[in-house]
Amino acid sequence: MAKVFLCFSQQLIEDIKSDEQFGSWSKTYQFDVHGAYLEQPLLESGAESDTFALPVKPGDSIYSLSVIFSSGDSYGTARGKGELVWCFPTYEAAEAAEKAYQDAIALGECSVVFDVITETGEIQQVTVNNLGYGYHEDIQQLVISTHSLE
């Protein structure tokens, strides 16, 4: 098992506000997963990283699943927000988690359950929140990205 650092960032691209009290607003974000490393990288301003234990070695490809969503209230919406769901050693595992997320959205379930490989190499089910379950949230896209380990 290797400790994998997956780096991502969310940038505010556009911010529009009305000058009126109780006026409308709109924000647009860009979410990006931009690197997978076997050592803790030096993060650029605004970047974050999550750590995963995966059965991989340098040069292997890994796969991240992210959810892009919008949220808001009666006055406006923030579009393009993102969240890293999980990281997987195979494309098939990422695809299975994506399908579980799609099924949870379709069924209106508040949680998503899918399989991951633990540090001991066993398969274990994990549960994450379904961001599409909230009253003001709407899933725009589920994204599987491929990363080469550096």
Image (tube, helix red, strand yellow):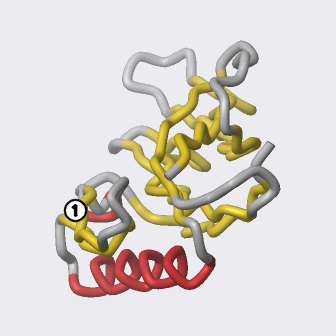
Compared with residue 98, is residue 137 higher up or lower down, i.e. above or below? above
What residue is shown at x 70% (from left), y 38% (from top)? 37
- Judged left or right of residue 43, residue 141 is left
x, y percentage for residue 70?
Answer: 48, 52
Q: Which residue was labeled with disc 1?
A: 127
Instruction: Please tell me whether residue 105 is drawn above or below residue 87 in the rendered image.
Output: below
Residue visible at 40% across and 43% down in the picture: 72
Q: Secondary structure at mark 1?
A: strand
Would you place residue 52 above or below residue 49 in this image?
Answer: below
Residue at figure coordinates x 55%, y 69% from the top left: 142
- At x 56% / y 15%, what residue is drawn? 19
Residue 128 falls left or right of residue 146: left
Q: Quadrant of the C terminus?
A: top right
Figure disc tally: 1
133 vs 44, nearest the viewer: 44
Query: Label 1 sits on what residue type?
Result: Thr
- Residue 12 position, x and y percent, is 67, 29
- Residue 30, image x, y percentages: 70, 42
> Label 1: how many residues lie within 10 Å, few (<14), some (14-19) or many (20+)?
few
| Quarter of the image where one finds residue 75 | top left
Task: Residue 18: give x, y in percent of width and height.
Answer: 57, 23
In this image, 113 relative to 29: left or right? Answer: left
Q: Nearer the viewer, residue 70 or 65?
A: 65
> Closest to the observer: 4 or 119?
119
Closest to the observer, 78 or 113? 113
